[in-house]
Amino acid sequence: FFVLQALAKAGMYPTASAAIRGLWGAMRAQGATTWWEQWNPSLDRVGNPLPSGVIPNVSLAHGYGTSPLYYLSTRVLGVQPTGPGFSTFSVSPDTSSVQWANGTVPTPQGNIAVSWTTAAAGTLSITITAPPLTAASVVLPRLAGDQISVGGQVVWQAGNAISSLAPGPSVVNSTPSQVTIQVPSGTYQMLSQ
C-alpha cells in the first residue's frame, strides 16, 4: 500500500502501474481469485519452497493485498474526496501509464462513475457522473491545442476561460499545465485537446 502511494506522490505512476502488473499479476498467473498475504504462498518466509504437503501459513484473502484497488480508484481513475462523505470530490486521473480507465466509486451520496480515454492525436476524453447533492472538481491537462469543452461547448481556449455554463460547469482554476472545472451533480462529457 505505502509503496504504491509513495510512487504516486513522487509522480512515478508508470512504475506503480508496472508493480501492480508484475506483483499482483503474478498472483493472478498462479490462479489467485483473491489477493494473498505474500506474493507466492508456495514459498516460506525466506523464499525457500515449502515441503510437499505443507500448507502455507498465510492468508489467501489478505486485506493489504487490495492496495491496487485503492491506487487504481484514487490515482488512475483519479477520484478523491474533498468533503465529508464525498459531498465534494476531485477527479484528476493519471493518464501516463494506461490509455483508458473506467470505473465506479461507491460513496454515501451514490456512485461516482468515471470513464476516460486518451488518443494518439493528443486528446483526453472523460465522462463523469456526480451523484445528487455533490459537486466535483475535474482536473484536466492543458494539451497542445489548449482547448477544453464540456458537453460540446468550449469552456477553455488558449489560456482563457471562455464561459461558464451557469449553473453548471465553470472553470475555477488554471495552471500552466492544467485546468480545473467545477461541476454540480449530473453527467458530463469533457474533452481536452
Image (spheres, rainbow, N blue to C red):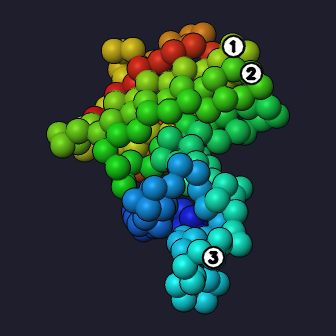
Which is more N-terminal, label 1 or label 3? 3
Dot 2: element: loop
- Taking the spot 67% from the left edge, 29% from the top edge, the residue there is 106
Query: Around disc 2, counting alpha carbons within 10 Å, would you say few (fewer than 14), some (14 to 19), or many (20 or more)?
Result: some
Density class for disc 1 (Cα within 10 Å; few <14, some 14-19, many ≥20) is few
Seen from the viewer's position, the closer of residues 186 and 148 is 186
Front one among 150 and 61 = 61
Query: Taking 50 as reference, is 20 left or right?
Result: left
Residue tagged by mark 3?
54
Question: What's the distance in space between the residues labelled 1 and 2, CA to CA?
Answer: 7 Å
At x 58% / y 51%, what residue is drawn?
A: 34
Residue 78, relative to residue 186: is it above or below? below
Given the image, on which type of amino acid does mark 2 rest? Gln
Relative placement, left or right, of 187 versus 119 is right
Seen in the picture, residue 168 relative to 176 is either above or below; the reply is above
Q: Quadrant of residue 112?
A: top right
Image x and y of residue 32, in percent: 51, 55
Residue 158 percent coordinates (x, y):
32, 36
In the image, what residue type sits under mark 1?
Pro
| Residue 176 percent coordinates (x, y) | 42, 50
Residue 22 is situated, as x and y percent measured from the top left of the image, at 41, 66
55 lies left or right of 92 = right
Q: Secondary structure at mark 3?
A: loop
Q: Which mark is residue 109?
A: 2
Q: Are marks 1 and 2 in contact (CB under 8 Å)?
A: yes
Residue at the disc numbered 1:
132
Label tally: 3
For the C terminus, the quadrant is top left
